[in-house]
Image (cartoon, rainbow, N blue to C red):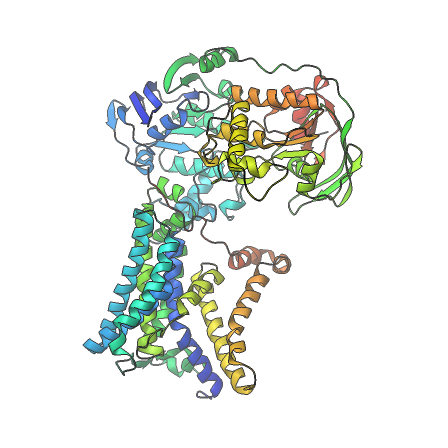
Amino acid sequence: MRIELRDIRKYFGPVKANDGISLVLEGGRIYGLLGENGAGKSTLMKILSGYQPPDSGDILFDDQVQNFSSPKVALGKGVGMLYQDPLDVPPFTVNDNYLLGRDNRVVLDYKSAIQELQEMTSRFSFELDLQSNIEDLSLGERQQLELARLLVGGAQVLILDEPTTGISAEQKDVLFDSIRKLAFEEGKTVILVSHKLEEVQELCGEGMVLQKGKLVGKTELPCPNEKLVEMMFGQVPERGERTEFPLGQPVLGLVDLHVTTYRLSIRDVDLTLQQGEVFGLAGLEGSGQRILLQACAGLLHPDHGKILLSGQDVTGLQYHRMQDKGVGYAAAGRLEEGLIEGLTLAEHVELAKPKHRFFIDRSQLNTTTESKIDQFQIVGRPDSTADELSGGNQQRLLFALLREKLKLILLEHPTRGLDVRSSNWIWDQLYQRREDGTAILFMSADLDEIFERSDRIAVFSGGVMSRVLETKNTSVDEIGHLIGGQA
Amino acid sequence: MDSSPLVLTLASIILASTPLIIAVCGEILTERSGIVNLSLDGTMLMSAMTGFVVAFETDNVWLGFLGAMGVGAFFAFIVAFGSIRLRQSQFAIGFVLTLLGDDLSAFLGQNYTRIPGPVVQHYAIPILKDIPIIGPIFFNQNVIVYFAYILVFVTWFWLFRTQPGLRLRSAGDRPEAGFARGVGINFQRYLYTIIGGGLVGVAGASYSLNIKIGWAEGLTRGFGWIALAIVIFGGWSPIRGMFGALLFGATKALATYLQRTFPEVSVVAFNAIPWVLMILVLLLVGSDFTERVITVAPKSLRRPLQRFLKISPPQALGSTFVED
């Protein structure tokens, strides 16, 4: 099927999310759609998949104008979109979720549902427990189910929105294999929306770059990364230079640490971090990195072992006491764990202060907030609420709320979902903190980030921490082995 | 044997629990679609009054039920319209309707208080009524009671075994996903709020036409809140909700019995028994102890057991959904 987008426009108030985009997509090809945060990728894909109508412009399939009034209609015409956060119903069983909206018969036909699902999953070698509830599946498995549902629903065009965020490397390989199969063997059109240039290069045959709502470039892939980055940003952004930083006194000491949670336990962790050191934790999601960070923050308590902060035993202290001792923690779920949806920026700043008074000094608070907004380049006003901010700005706010002069900063996925420029900016801020003797312990699913930013690296696999590696003496291969659980 | 005090007591517990079972099924349908109809207490009073007045004036109980159903559906419509269309707080609307229903029913029904009127006729089911013990308890009742049995099963089947049930639940659990698959989320919410309200109306009328026959100011006061509590207690499942309502009825009967046995203890103390029991059961069901018990169970039973015991509200309960 040949798809043509003609002069698509979509404005949200003064924001031109899509400002006259025209594209042609052929069957049997994999396209990469690239662009900075807010470049208009999501809007364009939502229009193509029937979630939003365009203000003007046409969608043509084989030269026939289409009018999508809803995602269901779009899927009926062959366009399916796989969201970063799969659009399924977590409390449902796999079968119920699959059958929802499938047809108009009143009584559910489980038999054929199971059959269809089994056929699909074996065709793409997905390994799924069809008896479980959606909420018990991993993100990768939920994605596979959505994919199966879209394909059975008749999708000829598949849109994948950041599909590799939060899934394991193994699941990613399975996903990429199925995408190739769909495009090259079955002639489907695949559009991959991604931040990760490596993935786009690996998978796609053609890259399309959006900038400020306009299509600014097209290129055959693979091509040099610099070329794509230049199209996305107009210029190659300065990558944060890794300078040698002289390390100081030990800040964090972990001695034979054991932490048990109901899902997973970590054992025998011994580690020392020095002032100014950046330490990266790699591993699949849920291998124990997060437990270690939470233990260091005082959010989880060890069964035995010791946590030392500048030589002082802080084992068993609660988070707010750890904060007073100079530990800062920025969780991955920005709106879930880090920020409070309905509160304004100013109110966040007030809450994050180490000392509270009963009455709030409004004018002083506004001044402090303004200066934080300035310093952290947050696009927002003191009276904007946290949920009004974009993802990148929420992350900036999270960093703005970390206290000054910390001994130790703990970070989960510090730049997840951010574009290259915002990531660099965040790391520049973090590097500046090293001047105060702050040590940084972070986890990330992005290996490039771990390599580029850390002085030393450790890998978690099934709750066991690997030996500590010097970044300059290790390789992606070695880390890959360790992530897979091979020593 | 068939008319032993125990059998008679059990039969009366079933009868007394009927309106609660009906109201609980109605509210479960509503809440599963994502809307909380908090007006139950007021709706029940209004429909109990309307049911009696209509039945009295027309001398037909079924027209009474029909009228009550209409009033229940109308109150529910106000909740749905206010929260979906006008985007106001459904809790505030429901609460105000509760207060309104209380006073309005007292005002409109003032000329009909404490007068005799038509009642639902007793109807024993042939053959079934002759089963020893079970017959006299379950099948020597009236049509409203039988309707409640069927309603529990139909509600359960509708929710968990049909395509319309999936659509309804998707509106309450993840409206975005339902919308993506062609479910009209707000249509579902209107529909099941109104149906649920209609059922609550039937429940109200089954007090004034069946259990506490006649009309008096505040006749059913409190029962709406009890139904709302049982919905939560029952984990939004009609089967468990039915058990909740029966448990409530049974403890009430127990309280009456104890009261007679220990006349020196204050009545108020016995009235608290059902609530204490409910809280204990809720605590027990959600505790580590139960989790451990489940792990001892044979593997094939574990998942069904966990599903049965799990209590989680519809995840989008009380939220508004805007279709793009």
Q: Residue A155 location, x and y as percent?
A: 36, 32
Quadrant that contains the N terminus of chain A: top left
Whether residue B201 is visible, yes or no, is yes
In this rendering, the count of numbered labels is 0
Q: Residue at x 54, y 26 (%)?
A: A371
Residue A31, compared with residue A251, is above or below; it is above
Query: Is A271 on the left-hand or right-hand side of B48?
Result: right
Q: Is residue B48 left or right of residue A144?
A: left
Instruction: Say which quadrant the C terminus of chain A sits in.
Output: top right
Residue at x 68%, y 30% (from the top left corner): A406
**Residue at screen point 40% across, 64% down:** B24
Q: Is residue A274 above or below residue A343?
A: above
Of residues A425 and A372, the one nearer the viewer is A372
A90 in relation to A377, above or below: below
* Residue A434 location, quadrant: top right
On the rendered structure, is A333 left or right of B73? right
A158 or A184, which is in the foreground? A158
Residue A40 drawn at (x, y percent): 39, 24
Question: Can you give x and y, in whole percent of width and height, for residue A277 in the image?
Answer: 71, 23
Q: Can residue B202 be seen by looking at this rendering?
A: no
Residue B32 shown left or right of residue A142 in the figure: left
Position of residue A315 measured from the top left corner of the image (x, y, whole percent): 76, 41
The one of B256 and A217 positioned closer to us in this rendering: B256
Image quadrant in which you'd find residue A25: top left
